[in-house]
Amino acid sequence: MNHPPAAALTHDEEERSSRLIDAFRGAVGRPAGFLVRAPGRVNLLGEHTDYNGLPVLPMAIDRSVMIALAPRQDRTIRLFNTSPQFTPCTYELSDAIPPYADGNWGNYSKAAAQGLARHCGARLQRGADLLIDGNIPAGAGLSSSSALVVANALAVLAANDIDLPYESLAELLPLAERYVGTLSGGMDQATSLLARAGHALRIDFFPLRVRTVPLPAGYSIVVCHSLVQAEKSGAAKRAYNLRVIECRLACRVLDRLLGTGVPRRLDTFGDLTVFFPHRPLLDFLSYLTAQLPERPLSLSEIAALIGTSPERLYEECGAVGDAFALLPRTRHVLSEAERVEQAERALRDGDALAFGQLMDASHGSCRDDYDISCPELEELIRIAKEAGAVGARLTGAGFGGCTVNLVAEPEVPAFLMRLDRYFYRSRLAHSERVGQYRFLFKPQAGAAVYAL
Ligand code: NG1
């Protein structure tokens, strides 16, 4: 076994899982053989750095996807969900599974199954009946989609009695999740699989490396939902993918500017840390600043800078947009990676105030240079700062979703009261529980499989 022993379920999870196991028998007509739990995550710092090969600082939250399952003798996967909004679906395991329509929840299961079928080959023989229960809000930047992919992958592996190291899964599943059309990085799957209770993680990519980072004593992490859903099946997916392409294009321009100074083509900004391990990343911004305007560029302008044709570039990056803000995007990514380095040091030194300042700076950069904030997130951040948050920033992909706040423990009750009064009260119906939308949590352990 290359993964930690399954962490004990909390009291709430015990109750949730026994309801799920009972419901499985009702829905499927036979007992479940396994239970899987895969948590969502909140990212403390390092936004939109993962697909650039640069580090992140996330931790697992106490909301998760749970699956009760029983193996089948054929290669059919049957999906049921405790929420009636997600209608049941059925498909066959194979290494080329045709997708459902864009936005169908079953595609996240298919993404995991196809990825595993390609990786495991003939060893993957058995399908399964799965009853899925999730309590991570969707489109909230808390990684509900990757938790669903991770949980489905562990369910299919359990049904087939295959034990893959979690580290391998954490490298395989981000590529598998591209099945749904998002060009995402690997932070979410790695956190869901490899998180440690009571800690944040520093994760580096290509190759994946993970180490635990302590959290400052005497402070709480509070997550607040802006009530704007950034569903990754619509406009948020296009906006996310555009950022990925802008970064790739900026690397192409930088590669050209560095000329023979790089040993091989610069594919991601992270390659800079491999080629020039002793140079601060922000040094490289000056190359682009000297050559590029602040304004977005057209594909033809970028092609001219790289020395290729617009048609060729269009083929390479797809029809994701017609204006590419290379300089501001680079400034965010390179400065954010530096902030992760400083933040890890601040956390190891127990310096919560320094860490909070880095969170604030990260938010400014996400808003101004990466353009992923929205009015509701800005209002939440303003209220949080007025209410005494030491640091406050948007978390996850952005375009809505949640903020993450560092708050001194004695100030948490007053902080929550102010948020309720100035943000949530006018927006939520009386019947809605505000605790669903803003919550504190203890960092959780990563995913686990339990034989029943
Ligand atoms: P969320 O917020 O969970 O959609 C997305 C990406 C991450 C990362 C962050 C931004 C997916 C599945 N995940 O997370 O890989 O790039 O945005 O830091 O798209």
Image (cartoon, rainbow, N blue to C red):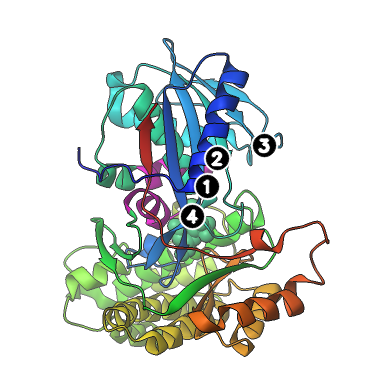
Inter-mark Cα distance, 3 to 2: 14 Å
Residue 222 appears at what percent x and percent y?
A: 54, 71
User: Are the two marked residues, 4 and 1, in contact with CB atoms closer than 8 angstroms?
Assistant: yes
Q: Specify few, some or many for label 4: CA neighbours under 10 Å numbering under 14, 14-19, or 20 or more.
A: many
Which residue occupies the foreground of this view, 83 or 111? 83
Residue occupying image coordinates x 62% and y 48%: 233
Q: Which residue does the numbered mark 4 point to in the structure image?
A: 62
Secondary structure under tag 2 reads helix
Answer yes or no: do the residues labelled 3 and 2 have beta carbons within 8 Å? no
Amino acid identity at mark 4 = Asp
- Give the label on residue 12, or none: 1
Amino acid type of the residue tagged 1 in the rendering: Asp
**Label 3 or label 1, whichever comes before in sequence order:** 1
Q: Which residue is mark 3?
A: 83
Query: Which residue has dot 2 on it?
Result: 16
Residue depicted at 57% across the width and 38% down the height: 133
Measured in 3D between alpha carbons, the distance from the residue under mark 4 to the one under mark 1, in whole angstroms, is: 10 Å
- What's the residue type where badge 2 is placed? Arg
Seen from this angle, which residue lies furthest top?
73
Left or right: 356, with 431 as reference point: left
Instruction: Give the dominant element type of the magenta stretch: helix, strand or loop.
Output: helix
The span picked out in magenta is 173-194
**The image quarter in which residue 414 lies:** bottom right
**Mark 1: which secondary structure?**
helix
